[in-house]
Amino acid sequence: MRIAIASDHAAVALKTALADWLGEQGHSVTDLGTDGSASVDYPDYGYRLAEAVAAGQADYGVALCGSGIGISIAVNRNPACRCALVSEPLSATLAREHNDANVIAMGARLTGIDMAKACIAAFLATPFGGDRHARRVGKLSNPPAFDDAIAAKAD
C-alpha cells in the first residue's frame, strides 16, 4: 500500500520509527515531514497529509502530533479525508470497518511505538464493512443541512 505519514515536532521520533517499520512491511511510504525538533505548526502537516490522500497520492495516511488531537482536526478539514484518532487496535479496526477511515492519527506523548505499530497493523488489515455503514459514511462528506437532519429525525 501507499502510505503518507506526517508529524509535527513532538512526534518526529515516532514518525521516523513508523515510516521505517512500514517500509520494512513492504509499503511505499511518503514522509511529508517535519524532520526536526524545531517547533512547527501541526495544521500545516495535517493539511499536507490530507491533500496527499485526497489527491490519490497515498492510499492511507498516518498523522502524528503530541496528542494526535490537533493534527486529526486539521486532516478532517478536507472532506475527502476521514481521520480517526486512535489509541489501541480495536478503535483502529472500528475506524476502518465502520467509518471507512483513510487516515489514522495518534499522539506521540500518549502512544508508544509498539502500540502505534499494533494500531496501524489493525487499521491496514481491516476492510470497510460497507452495508449499513456506507450511508452514514456518505453523510460525513456530504452533510445534510442541520435543520433537514433534525426534521428527518423527528419524522
Image: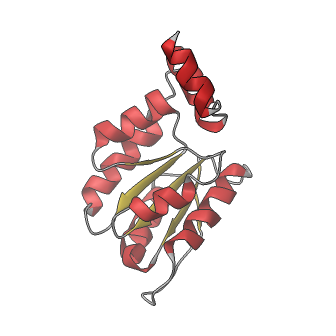
Q: Is residue 103 left or right of residue 88?
A: right
| Spot occupied by residue 130 in the image (x, y as percentages of width and height) | 54, 20
| Spot occupied by residue 45 in the image (x, y as percentages of width and height) | 56, 70
Q: Is residue 89 above or below residue 3?
A: above
Q: Quadrant of residue 37?
A: bottom left
Q: Is residue 135 above or below residue 91?
A: above
Residue ranking furthest to the top: 155
Q: Is residue 20 above or below residue 140?
A: below
Q: Is residue 112 left or right of residue 13?
A: left
Q: Quadrant of residue 121?
A: top left
State how many labels appear.
Answer: 0
| Spot occupied by residue 71 in the image (x, y as percentages of width and height) | 48, 63
Residue ranking furthest to the right: 55
Q: Is residue 47 above or below residue 147?
A: below
Q: Quadrant of residue 80?
A: top right
> Could one spot residue 25 in this view of the protein?
yes
Q: Nearer the viewer, residue 45 or 124?
A: 45
| Spot occupied by residue 31 in the image (x, y as percentages of width and height) | 57, 69
Residue name at image x 56 percent, y 19 percent: 151
